[in-house]
Amino acid sequence: MSTSEQTGPRVALVTGAGRGIGRGIALALGERGWRVLVNYRADADSAASCVREIGEAGGEARAIQADVAASEGRATLLREAIGAWGGVDLLVNNAGMAPRQRVDILEMTEASYDEVMGVNLRGPLFLTQGIARHMLAAERAGTIINIGSMSAVVASTSRGEYCISKTGMGMMTKLYADRLAEHGIHVYELRPGIIETDMTAVVLERYRRLVSQGFTPIRRLGLPQDVALACVAIVEGHFPFSTGEVINIDGGQHLQRL
Ligand code: NAD
């Protein structure tokens, strides 16, 4: 059965959707008639306010607490997400973290490496595995969108573990895109540049200055809505002959310039 043949609104699971980019994506989908599952790890209030805001916009949403880095968390998330409205049509792997401390790669600890890789790569890798198995078993066409980063290709020696996790996500996008295409499941990666969220709050002033001096061809910082609109373009079906595609949402930062 294809998504369009299923009855009722389509269902999206967005991880880490209480704030930032995930919240922007959840709101954009909710406003467009999707049923949205708002995953959060610890901040129940922000998830509840996201659910409320979607409701006020005329949409439907539910919050699900789960740590995507933990296998028990992912098992809970899968069970509750699939149980909520009978299935999932879209997974947005958004939850992510920067290292707790930016330190030179020569000082990087194994604990920080394990933590960042667990949240940013192992978590989405195995959550996608679970959702893909569900979509296949339900003969449900679907979409998977990974929120990667320009850090997949831009080296920052003060947060090497983050860069490595996002480079890994780039290969994860390719692997699932290849494996799932014949089943009507398409996989995309959005690669944000500098987006104004809590994650970048600590470095925002420096980035704002750089951007105003021309660091990016488009001279402004990105907003969660910039990423959300790219998600919308994908799920509205405007890329039917593409999978494994990376879309840079970075003000042109990835361009090599002289
Ligand atoms: P953010 O810190 O504002 O939001 C991240 C969200 O993920 C939070 O709600 C957090 O609670 C949640 N989260 C973290 N670990 C989790 C876990 N184990 N289980 C469940 N939820 C968890 O950051 P953001 O800027 O909105 O980032 C969202 C995504 O975008 C991340 O994957 C990030 O790497 C990526 N990204 C952000 C930027 C940027 O400039 N802000 C740039 C490139 C990529």
Image: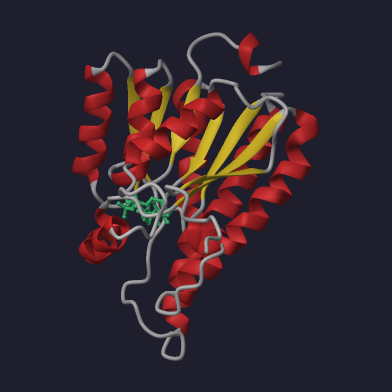
Name the foreground residue: 138 vs 102: 102
The residue shown at (36%, 22%) is: 30
The residue shown at (64%, 39%) is: 187
Question: Where's residue 119, x and y in %?
Answer: 46, 60
Name the foreground residue: 181 vs 44: 181
Horizontal side of residue 253 vs 246, given as left or right: left
- Specify how the rendered protein is coloured: secondary structure
The residue shown at (25%, 55%) is: 198
Question: Where's residue 105, x and y in %?
Answer: 46, 85
The residue shown at (44%, 26%) is: 84
Horizontal side of residue 225 vs 206, given as left or right: right
Residue lying furthest bottom: 106
Residue 70 appears in the rendering: no
Residue lying furthest right: 182
Looking at the image, how many numbered discs can be counted on the residues?
A: 0
As displayed, is residue 50 above or below residue 246?
above
Q: Quadrant of the N terminus?
A: top right
Residue lying furthest front: 258
Question: Where's residue 123, x and y in %?
Answer: 52, 56
Horizontal side of residue 24 vs 1, given as left or right: left
Name the foreground residue: 106 vs 179: 106
Residue 33 appears in the rendering: yes
